[in-house]
Amino acid sequence: MAPKGKRFLKKPTPLHQKTRAVPEGCLTGNLDHDSNALKQLIRDAGDLEYRLVYTQGHRHVALFYYADMVNLTLVSRGIIHPLQQCAQELDIAHIAQSLLNVPAYKQARELARLAEALAEGSVVLLFQGLAEALILGVSQIEHRVIERSESEDVLMGPHESFSEQLGRNLALMRSRLATPAFKNKFITLGKVSRSKVAVMFIDGIVSEDLVAEVEERLLRIDIDYISGAGHVSELLSDEPTAVLPLLRITERPSRVAGALMEGRVVVLADGDPSAIIIPTFAAEYLQSSEDYLERPAIASFLRFIRFGGLIISVFLPGLWHALVSFHHGIIPPPLFNSIVAGREGVPLPTVVEMIVLLLTYDIIVEASTRMPMRIGQALGIVGGIILGQAAVQAGLVSPAMVIIVSLTGLSTFTQPSVSILGPLRLLKYPMLVASSIFGLFGLMWALVFMVLQVVSMRSFGYPFMYPLAPFRWRGELDIFIRIPLFWLSKRPDLLAGQNQQRMNITPPYPGKGEQDGQSRKS
Amino acid sequence: MDNPVRVNLFQGAIAVFVVTIGTVFFPVAGVVVPIVGQAGWIAVLLGFLIPLPWVFMAAALVRKGPIGEWGQSVKAWLGPWVGRVFLLYIAFCWAWLGGLLLAQGGMVFHNIALPATPPWIMSFALLILVVLADMRGVEVYVRSIELLVMVCLPFVTAFYLAILPTMQLENLQPLLGDGPIRLAHAVYLVIPWAMEGILFGLFIGTHIKNNKRFGLTISLAVFGGGAALALLTAFTLGVLGRGVTETYLYPTVELAQTARVGFFLQGIEIFLYPLWFLASYIKTGAAFVVVSESLRGVWAGATQPYRSLALGVLFFAVSQVPNTVQQVVASLGRVDSTFFMAFYVIIPALLLWVSIARKGDPNQSANS
């Protein structure tokens, strides 16, 4: 026998079951009945507006909409006013086509479909005596305007970034790729959130297999709620637990356009300014959009700095610890003596001292990232300079260690992509731990372990380390140096199998026979 | 989606090149110079030049079997049962070599860098990486080599640039003072190193889809490895001289100690340790992968990860047999001169067998 009192307690129904359990049915033509059924279906919705309109022809029409999701002027002038003025008995198609002044309409008879349309920002009209309703597309949801990208800001080139509105983002892409070959397919994800996701590609360049794979993986996602691209990218990824981001996320339409033209697929989700580039290769995290606006020599130098920054940010703490603690024979005695003198009185072992300092640095970075810009700057100054100086003066850490940790921290932020900063901040710790156990041997062990991990990773089936492994001369060159554009006449061979040629230009060298200062025309 | 990329010819060539050099770059001068003196580098060069026809024989063999799996190819050449025996022999040779290389890797680090750490710990650490590589498959192992070669390049370049100023050309004279007999003896000792590269090339060739230029490319890779070792021998002789080179087991370490790179760093030989580590991983990994794939060909029931783990135990057991570096070097010499040298007869015989006995049945697949 069930204990007393429990019989009054109903087992809570999971949300997804509730949404499935809503009464489904069709319209009957009885306005009161249909209105009540729809209200019952969308119960507990405080922002739902319901209004009855009486036409001059004595017909009753019920309007349903969410007040903050529709263009109220259009509702008033384009829907309510024409309905009130209508004296004839028109059928539903004529009402939509010739009476109402709205940009888009659909007809439906299922209550569930009407509820979904309301949630998307449409106005639903129910008519007395008609077992069919009109769904009118007059949604107007306030969104952020197009702004500069904060996470991928550049000095040169286009500054605009995506916003949270999918339609506007697609329009941005259409303005950049004004070709009918630019395709986008919509998929709805999230049983509750019903988020729209657009799969974009360039027909004729992209591999059809890749598009099919993206669609298949998206359709396989069975989830209640999708918050945005980050959510989707984890669900799409070949290895969701990998430390490195196997799918690149960007807010820049220019980068998305470039990716599409290389034969990739890009996924945009409604309500998120981020786009997912599929597939992604590790080397791309070293490349900045500005590289191709700079002179090749300058851009190559900057890439070299970034590559050096990447190496330093991961390996320097471990290497320093290995040299100072295990292989100090490599350091000349005067220098080693000064390092030892700096450590005099420091209570912590070298490895603990370094881990504490690195963690402190990461805490300062995290705190200043979450603060408003001005407070963040002040926090950086207080945390970085004052705290560091005070720690050295108090004898808690050695000056050399502060220099190593600062250089490591600075090097991390040479990377142009925000997505790679987190992994770089994390990876230096295992390297340091490995070197603290076995010195250079441990560091090399950790390096080979990491190499084995990254070479086995795949981004949508494509090797993540392409064009380093598997090696490709052309692609390889464009990682370490920025080669002139006329050498990049072909798309990455792994991506664009058939349509590889992207330009047919000859380098604009001056004619050999021409004299200096003499133009070709003359 | 199917994996768009498998092992390609370039990857195969890089792997063969690096496996050929392998861990030999440490003792190479110490092996040939005591026998043939200043002509040591010529002996190394000849030792890698003479076996080149065997590369083309290996290429001809590769073309006669299915592509994609080593065991299937061998069984297609020799039939299921003789093929299994051959695979077992290959596995035996490489397992012994791999175990000794594992021991050498740990002992060298113990002797020159971490004297407080027992060598078996470092051998075990190395073994973990090798087992991991085998579990991920041949493709991942070959890709890891590609990436690690790029890591090695700056170290190698820095090494040569640092020792170049101390080179004395007169140390290379007289060139052929020890006579042709001793030169032939030195060449005989070098030839098995080339055979290791050729055998690995034969193995990797069965994974390469487009292998039309396989013979030429792999022969370049093997000879390139030999040329790099000959250059290293010449540098060692030029910098240390014959007398000093003869006295060391690993003259390359002594060579590195002569380098001076200014006041900030000294004892630049420390940067040889990463190279040694990577070479140990690559060569031991090659042995492990070949043994693993051979056993898979012998018995299809040997599935992952049990195969790799069992082999790991075997390799580790072999690595614990020798107690000193001298014993390891002597054992490696014996394995090379007996088992790997035997392939100079086995490969032509195999090609002859496949060409004659299985003529008219070129597409026969392994009946396993």
Image (cartoon, rainbow, N blue to C red):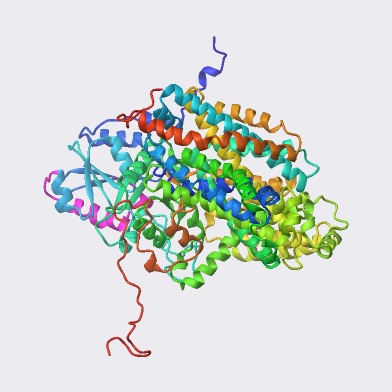
Does residue B365 show up magenta in the picture? no
* Magenta span of residues: A64-91
The C terminus of chain B - image quarter: top left
Image location (x, y in percent) of residue A68: 38, 52
Visible in this render: residue B365?
yes
| Residue at image location 63% in from the left, 28% down from the top | B314
Can you tell which quarter of the image residue B5 is in?
top left
In this view of the protein, which residue sits in the foreground, B88 or A221?
B88
* Left or right of residue B36: residue A24: left
* Left or right of residue B112: residue A132: left
In this view of the protein, which residue sits in the foreground, A218 or A26?
A218
* Left or right of residue B241: residue B302: left
Visible in this render: residue A127?
no
Q: Main secondary structure of the magenta part?
A: helix
Image location (x, y in percent) of residue A8: 51, 20
In this view of the protein, which residue sits in the foreground, A451 or A278?
A451
Does residue A72 show up magenta in the picture? yes
Image location (x, y in percent) of residue B233: 64, 55
